[in-house]
Image (cartoon, rainbow, N blue to C red):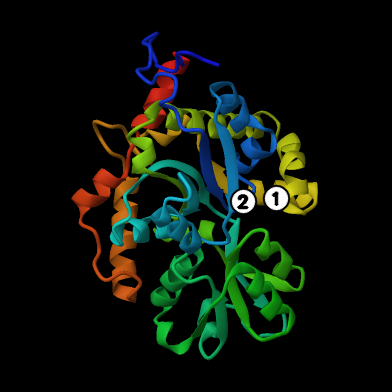
Amino acid sequence: MISLVLIGCNNEQSSIAEGELPTEINIGYLRVPNDEMVAMTEGLFKEYFDDKGIKTNFVIFDSGVDANKALSSGSIDFASMGHTNGVIALATGLDVELIWLHEILGEIEGLAVQKDSGINQIEDLAGKTVATTFASTSHYSLLQILNEMGITEDVELLDMQTMDIVAAWERDDIDAAYTWQPSLGRILETGNLLISSEQVADMGHKTANITLARKAFSENYPELVADVIAAMAEGGNLYRENKENAAEIVAEPLEISVEEALNQMQGSIWLTPEEEITQEYLGTSEQLGDFANVMKETADFLEDQGSISNSPDQKMLDAFIEPKYIEIFLAREE
C-alpha cells in the first residue's frame, strides 16, 4: 500500500495522502476510433491508476445526451461527447468543465444519401427525410448547411440514435442521414457522401469531440485529471508514431476492419497536448483560445433551435474551459 502518492509536478509532493484517493474512476466514452479508444484498449489508463490502488471503469455511451445524464447523477467522473452536448451540459447547470479536445471532426462525420434518392446537392434535400442524432455535432453541422441553403423548413428531420439510423437506412425509411463513424461507414456501403464535417468546418462551423470532467472530482484530484490526460496523450502519440498499428489496436473493439479504422482515424485532426493549449484551440489558463468562441457560436445556435432555453454568456463559457490540467501534464514532461 502506498503511504504517499508522488504525483505533483516540479518535484513537489502532492498533498493527497493515503486514504484520500478515490477507489475508482469512472470514464464514459464513445465508440469512435480516437486517442481515448487507443489508450483504453492498450491499458494505458490502468498503467496510470493501478499503482495508486485506483480501479478504472469504462462505460459506453451512444451519445452525449446519455453521458450528460450520467454526469448529472454522479455515476461517472469523465465523459466524451461532441462539443454541442458540452454546451448543453453547461447550459443545463451540470457542474462540469471541458478539459480536452479529442479531435477536430472532419470526414469522420458526414451526410450520406441513398444512391437512388435523387439527392446530388444540398438543395435537393428539400422534401426529403433526413435522420441525425439531435443535439449532436452531426445535428449541428446538418442544420448549419440547411440554414446556409435556406431549406431548413423544407426538410423532415428525424431524431435517431446511431444504431437506429443504420436500421432505418437499411429499411429505406430515410433518404439521408448525417452521422459519425462507424455508423457512417455502414450506411456508405450503399450510399454516397454528400458533404463531410471537414467541409462544414471550412464554411466556418468547426466541430469537435471533447472530454468533460465532473468538478466534484477534478477540483479534488487535479493530478489524477492530469493522469487521464496523460493516458489520452499517450494514445494520441501511438497513433502519430504508427497509424497502422493504432488502427489495429482499435479495430477489434469497434468490430471494424483495420483499413476501415485507419480511414476513420484519418478523417479527423488529432491534437497534441502542446497544440491543445495554442490560441487556435483551448489556449492557456492566462489566455483562452479561439475554441471558446466556437462554443459561444454553438450555444447561440442551440438556443435558436430550442435545444437550450438560454445561451450561456461568454464569461460562463470561458470559465467552463479549463486548460490547467493539460498544463499540469506538460509541466511534468519538462
Q: Is residue 202 visible?
A: no
Residue 200: horizontal and vertical position, in percent? Answer: 47, 62
Residue found farthest to the top: 11
Q: Quadrant of the C terminus?
A: top left
User: Residue 211 shows which numbered tag?
Assistant: none
Q: Is residue 99 visible?
A: yes
Q: Residues within 10 Å of mark 2 (few under 14, many from 20)?
A: many
User: Residue at 58% across / 70% down in the picture?
Assistant: 161
Residue 83: horizontal and vertical position, in percent? Answer: 42, 55
Q: CA distance from mark 1 to mark 2?
A: 6 Å
Residue 27: horizontal and vertical position, in percent? Answer: 53, 44
User: Residue at 60% across / 56% down in the picture?
Assistant: 108
Residue found farthest to the bottom: 127
Name the amino acid, label 1. Asn
**Residue at mark 1:** 263
Name the amino acid, label 2. Gly
Q: Is residue 4 above or below residue 184?
A: above
Looking at the image, residue 40 sits to the left or right of residue 52; the answer is: right
Q: Residues within 10 Å of mark 1 (few under 14, many from 20)?
A: some
SS class of the residue under badge 2?
loop
Q: Quadrant of residue 306?
A: bottom left
Q: Is residue 80 above or below residue 20?
A: below
Count of marks placed on residues: 2
Q: Contact (CB < 8 A) between labels 1 and 2?
A: yes
Pick whichever, 301 or 309, lies toward us: 309
Q: Is residue 155 above or below residue 54?
A: below
Looking at the image, residue 334 sits to the left or right of residue 172; the answer is: left
SS class of the residue under badge 1?
helix
Pick whichever, 283 or 21, lies toward us: 21
Residue 114: horizontal and vertical position, in percent? Answer: 69, 79
Q: Quadrant of the N terminus?
A: top right
User: Residue 267 shows which numbered tag?
Assistant: 2
